């Protein structure tokens, strides 16, 4: 039991540190495209601001929650968990709204085929976030599964951060490759976490599910120029956008 508690403590601390680093990188990644325009924020809509605030709040929660576990403050941890019942749906809705805004902006300045191809980066992600969060809540009394599915929600944010960092470092010439690299980077980490669970002979299903649905997102990016994907985007756009 003592060894299990030490292992839990170590993995929780590791996740806490990873989220702190990711939060710092988020500020760096979004500085050129958003933060540098503070406080005027010309040409940005209320959707941008609400989406940004909600994503930051989610990252802050991913930092606070493991910290509370480390400090054995389970009461506050559960309270924030209940608050997430309200914030998580708002995060999902904001993802959908920013995807819609992005699509409508693009379709005005480029051919539909190109605009639809770019949406391969956006359409799947909100549903992955909702799925991982829902599974985390369903298994909230199973710490092992709950933690892994909450970690999964972080990977729906990682791509947006890492792709922008790559563009900052290597320049805009990297273009779409930045998003490919970011998505493969994210799923590689999940696969390593899955491998770690397999080596320790613990339940591999949570990280398998996370990896599977992140893989679907990657497949959609590869399929962005196919008739099937173009038809999916056209249906979504005509029905909901």
Image (cartoon, grey):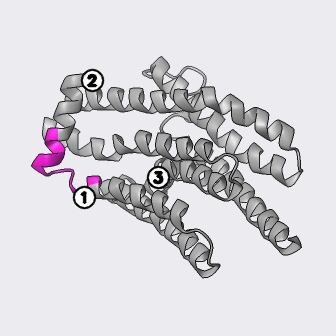
Q: Is residue 110 left or right of residue 89?
A: left
Labels 2 and 1 touching (C-beta < 8 A): no
Image mark for residue 149: none
Name which of mark 2 and mark 1 comes first in the sequence: 1
Q: Quadrant of residue 8?
A: bottom right
Please state which of the two labelled residues, at mark 2 or mark 3, is closer to the viewer: 2
Name which of mark 3 and mark 1 comes first in the sequence: 3
Labels 2 and 3 touching (C-beta < 8 A): no
Residue appearing at x 69%, y 29% in the figure: 83
Mark 3 Cα-neighbour bin, 10 Å: few <14, some 14–19, many ≥20: many
The N terminus, quarter of image: bottom right
Residue 228, given in percent of the width and then of the height, sits at: 14, 47
Q: Residue furthest left?
A: 227
Secondary structure at badge 1 equals helix
Q: Which residue is mark 3?
A: 159
Residue appearing at x 46%, y 59% in the figure: 209
The residue closer to the viewer here, 18 or 114, is 18
Residue appearing at x 13%, y 51% in the figure: 226
Name which of mark 2 and mark 3 comes first in the sequence: 3
Residue appearing at x 29%, y 46% in the figure: 120
Instruction: Magenta stretch: give its range.
Output: 220-231
Mark 2 Cα-neighbour bin, 10 Å: few <14, some 14–19, many ≥20: few
Residue 103, given in percent of the width and then of the height, sits at: 28, 31
The C terminus, quarter of image: top left
Q: Which residue is mark 1?
A: 222
Q: CA distance from mark 2 to mark 3?
A: 25 Å
Q: CA distance from mark 3 to mark 1?
A: 15 Å
């Amino acid at each position: 039991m003592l060894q299990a508690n030490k292992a839990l403590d170590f993995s929780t601390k590791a996740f806490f540190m990873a989220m702190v680093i990711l939060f710092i990188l988020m500020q760096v990644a979004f500085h050129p495209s958003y933060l540098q325009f503070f406080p005027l924020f010309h040409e940005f809509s209320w959707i941008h601001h609400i989406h940004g605030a909600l994503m930051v709040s989610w990252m802050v929660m991913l930092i606070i929650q493991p910290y509370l576990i480390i400090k054995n403050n389970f009461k506050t941890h559960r309270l924030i968990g209940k608050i997430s019942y309200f914030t998580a749906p708002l995060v999902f809705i904001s993802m959908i709204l920013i995807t819609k805004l992005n699509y409508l902006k693009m379709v005005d300045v480029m051919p539909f085929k190109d605009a639809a191809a770019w949406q391969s980066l956006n359409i799947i992600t909100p549903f992955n976030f909702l799925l991982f969060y829902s599974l985390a809540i369903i298994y909230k009394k199973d710490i092992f599964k709950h933690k892994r599915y909450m970690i999964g929600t972080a990977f729906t944010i990682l791509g947006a951060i890492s792709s922008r960092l790559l563009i900052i470092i290597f320049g805009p010439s990297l273009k779409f490759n930045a998003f490919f690299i970011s998505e493969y980077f994210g799923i590689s980490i999940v696969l390593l976490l899955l491998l770690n669970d397999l080596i320790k002979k613990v339940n591999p299903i949570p990280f398998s599910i996370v990896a599977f649905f992140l893989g679907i997102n990657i497949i959609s990016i590869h399929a962005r120029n196919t008739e099937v994907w173009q038809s999916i985007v056209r249906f979504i756009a005509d029905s909901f956008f």
